[in-house]
Image: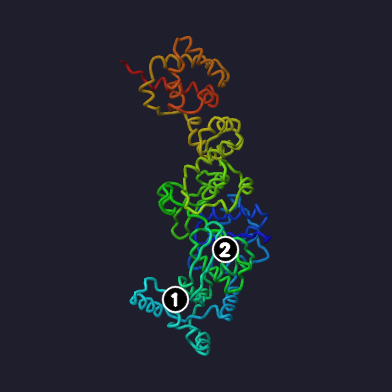
Amino acid sequence: MREVRVRFAPSPTGALHIGGVRTALYNYLLARQTKGTMILRIEDTDQNRFVPGAEEYIINSLKWVGITIDEGVGVGGPHAPYRQSERKAIYKEHAQQLIDKGMAYYAFDTEQELEEMRERLKAAGVATPQYNSITRMQMRNSLTLSEEETRNLIETGVPYVIRLKVPRKEEIRLNDMIRGWVMVHSSQIDDKVLMKSDGMPTYHLANVVDDYLMKISHVIRGEEWLPSAPLHVLLYKSFGWENEMPQFAHLPLLLKPDGNGKLSKRDADQLGFPIFPLTWKDPQTGEVAKGYKESGYLPEALINFLAFLGWNPGTTQEIFSMEELIAAFSVERIGKAGTRFDILKAQWFNQHYLRSKTDDELAGYLLESLKNEGVACDRGKAEKIAALMKERVTFPQDLWEQGKFLFHAPTDFDQAVVSKKWNEDVVKVLSGFRSEISSLQNLDATTAKSLLDKVTSALGIGTGKVLQAVRVAITGAGGGPDLMMVMEIIGRDEVIQRIDYALKTLKVKVA
């Protein structure tokens, strides 16, 4: 059986899109499941679109989500270098092989000549003008020029490209692991440029040559590359590499949350969720796009969410660790249809993974937020807050955002509750409760409940009738976590101060 070798091959043209992370994940899962090799290759042949810092960003993003690289950029390996910009001599050599075999040719056409060709074809009623098996014989290339003319043009430095000589009548077949058989007639494929006039290869040549030399067994990539796949098959055949050709799997598109159209950065920005794994600052515009990490998503939650964007295990299980995903994954269970990017589901996964963490781990998140806010808190108190809030939060920062009332006494009160619930009975209960706890050294949740029940019972007032107003007095809000535990956390003195402020500030309406 062929050794499984997969590659993730992004271009360093900006931040890594979340769809790219999914592609990397599926490659990684297959590699780990089969004890294969995960390769990182940087496809930077388009130097005009190169963005400084993008390569480092890609590496850091993969590291954060837990996708480890076995071979490639940042790791090394037997097929180095793994940046395409450093492999130009390799591509030139292979392009020459195709020319020597009569599978490719030099083309010296200027932009003006190419435009004139397109205009002629349009005038003749051709909807999509192409440089192909018919038109190439009317153009300036090594097929229409003599060997001497061709050699002279090259030697005198006339710019040229190398084009693939696509057969005129040939059916190209590709058995995609997700989509089944894909068939394209060669008449639909133009003579693609393989080497540009600047000496750099195009994506098509570099991609196929690298996959062959690096012994790639499976190419798992986005659906947008499906139209290029028949050309790549043709290149494998042109080189005589049919037997070493990898298996292809073209992943379904990630769609907008409503399912209408491909998900873009603009869509994500408008809907208020990240599109990149880590925060990215565009070095050209200075624009900052917040990432999933900085938005409070846990890497294990993001991975679980991404795995289900196109794949399903065939069971009702939804929560998968990375190890469980590796065991359950199969390319055959990836669907063809585009999949909706449901950010609410991502948040659901995040809630689950956050709640499964220990109070000590959650306390660490809270203490980090408090440090940034300049708020003092010991770990014991932080753990109590974590235990109190963990069922109510979606992101680590919510522990602070939703728990500020535990550190800052309210200055405003829920007026809807005050207008309905604040009355003489509440004032009596709070006054009596204050009196009871003032003699204590410490206040815990059990004691707080016992004393509150004692006061309401002595006054003949149902605790349930006044509890929401008591909560408003202490927290400012009409709802929230267990009130008795809140009082234990903030302590006796703080409870007394808050009751005093509420009694002083809130007035009972006179009927």
Q: Secondary structure at mark 1?
A: loop
Q: Of circles 2 and 1, which is in front?
A: 1
Which residue appears at 46% of the width and 48% of the height?
Answer: 340
User: Mark 1 sits on what residue?
Assistant: 131
Q: Quadrant of the C terminus?
A: top left
Residue 479 drawn above or below residue 301: above
Q: Secondary structure at mark 2?
A: loop
Task: Characterize the local packing of mark 2: few (<14), some (14-19) or many (20 or more) Cα atoms within 10 angstroms.
Answer: many
Residue 366 drawn above or below residue 278: above
Where does residue 26 sit, x and y in percent of width and height?
58, 53
Residue 42: image tag: 2
Residue that protrudes farthest toward the left in the picture? 511
Please name the amino acid that badge 2 sits on.
Ile
Q: Verify CB contact (< 8 Å) between mark 2 and mark 1.
A: no
Residue 36 drawn above or below residue 243: above
Q: Quadrant of the N terminus?
A: bottom right
Which residue appears at 60% of the width and 67% of the height?
Answer: 210
Where does residue 101 sit, x and y in percent of width and height?
58, 80
Residue 285: image tag: none
Which residue appears at 32% of the width and 16% of the height?
Answer: 510
Task: Characterize the local packing of mark 1: few (<14), some (14-19) or many (20 or more) Cα atoms within 10 angstroms.
Answer: some
Q: Is residue 300 left or right of residue 119?
A: right
Q: Nearer the viewer, residue 283 or 19?
A: 19
Where does residue 156 sit, x and y in percent of width and height?
51, 87
- Quadrant of the image occupied by residue 112: bottom left
Please name the amino acid that badge 1 sits on.
Tyr
Where does residue 121 sit, x and y in percent of width and height?
37, 76
The alpha-carbon separation of the residues under discs 2 and 1 comes to 29 Å
Q: Earlier in the sequence, mark 2 or mark 1?
A: 2
Residue 349 drawn above or below residue 170: above
